[in-house]
């Protein structure tokens, strides 16, 4: 990426970080300040999508990968909205993020064949199994199958991102691998807080690592070349 492109990415990063901070502040402040959370939670993800759209084009850019990541970010925005709505919209949010991970996985499979490296899939399978073992006694019966499917797709996405990094060893691969790992951390923290062991700092950890994940996955789309 050119010096101008790097500077532009830094500018986008500063705006995304500010929007994310306002969303987190609104979540914890509550009361009259809750509008910050409602306004800036989806806006932060949309800003990352806008960054992908604006910075991802150019000579040699992998347009198909960029489209897949852009679609995943829009689906993630829908998930953001469902998870912050009053009432129990968890399954709808889960479905939106499941579709987002399918989009990310499809894009990553453009950059390297599925299972291009075996060790990431083994590592993430072990991690996913450990998380499910913690959650299983606390999950409502009707959520067990949806959660297992979601965890499997999330782990596959993160593992494929690491496999792409292993095979291509470029900046886009590094960014996607970091993003995949952050997503696993964020969703594991969310699930443990929601179902097994709630703790006060969970929301800040979940949101900060979630947008770190989206940022790095989005950055991979601006760096990927065919």
Image (spheres, grey):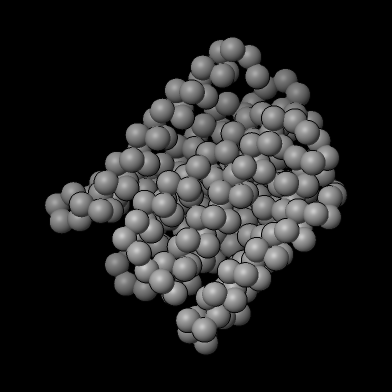
Q: What is the quadrant of residue 195 in the picture?
A: bottom left
Viewer can see residue 172: yes
Number of marks drawn: 0
Q: What is the quadrant of residue 82 in the picture?
A: bottom left
Q: Position of residue 217 (x, y in %)?
A: 60, 41
Q: What is the quadrant of residue 53 in the picture?
A: top right
For the point 65% across and 19% down, which residue is it? 1
Residue nearer the viewer, 56 or 133: 133
User: Does residue 39 appear to the left or right of 185 in the view shown?
Assistant: left
For the point 82% across and 44% down, which residue is it? 112
Q: Position of residue 167 (x, y in %)?
A: 83, 40
User: Does residue 173 appear to the left or right of 87 in the view shown?
Assistant: right
Q: Is residue 136 above or below residue 179?
A: below
User: Does residue 208 appear to the left or right of 123 in the view shown?
Assistant: left
Viewer can see residue 146: no
Q: Is residue 52 above or below residue 24?
A: above
Residue nearer the viewer, 51 or 126: 126
For the point 65% across and 41% down, which residue is it? 176
Residue nearer the viewer, 137 or 214: 137
Q: Position of residue 165 (x, y in %)?
A: 75, 40
For the point 29% across and 41% down, which residue is it? 22
Q: Position of residue 74 (x, y in %)?
A: 52, 48
Q: Is residue 104 above or below residue 55?
A: below
Q: Quadrant of the C terminus?
A: top right
Residue nearer the viewer, 61 or 12: 12
Q: Is residue 175 above or below residue 209?
A: above
């Amino acid at each position: 990426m050119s010096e101008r492109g790097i500077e532009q990415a830094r500018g986008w990063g500063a705006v995304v970080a500010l929007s994310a901070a306002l969303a987190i502040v609104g979540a914890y402040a509550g009361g009259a300040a809750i509008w910050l959370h409602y306004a800036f939670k989806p806006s932060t993800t949309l800003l990352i999508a806008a960054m992908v759209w604006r910075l991802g084009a150019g000579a040699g850019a992998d347009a198909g990968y960029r489209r897949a990541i852009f679609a995943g970010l829009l689906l993630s925005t829908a998930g953001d909205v469902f998870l912050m709505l009053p009432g129990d919209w968890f399954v709808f949010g889960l479905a939106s993020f499941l579709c987002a991970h399918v989009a990310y996985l499809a894009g990553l499979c453009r950059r390297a064949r599925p299972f291009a490296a075996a060790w990431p899939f083994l590592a993430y399978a072990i991690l996913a199994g450990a998380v499910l073992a913690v959650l299983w006694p606390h999950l409502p019966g009707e959520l067990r199958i949806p959660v297992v499917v979601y965890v499997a797709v999330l782990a596959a996405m993160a593992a494929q991102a690491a496999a792409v990094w292993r095979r291509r060893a470029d900046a886009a691969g590094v960014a996607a691998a970091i993003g995949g790992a952050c997503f696993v951390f964020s969703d594991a923290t969310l699930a443990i807080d929601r179902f097994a062991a709630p703790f006060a700092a969970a929301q800040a950890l979940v949101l900060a690592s979630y947008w770190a994940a989206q940022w790095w996955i989005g950055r991979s789309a601006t760096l990927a070349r065919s």
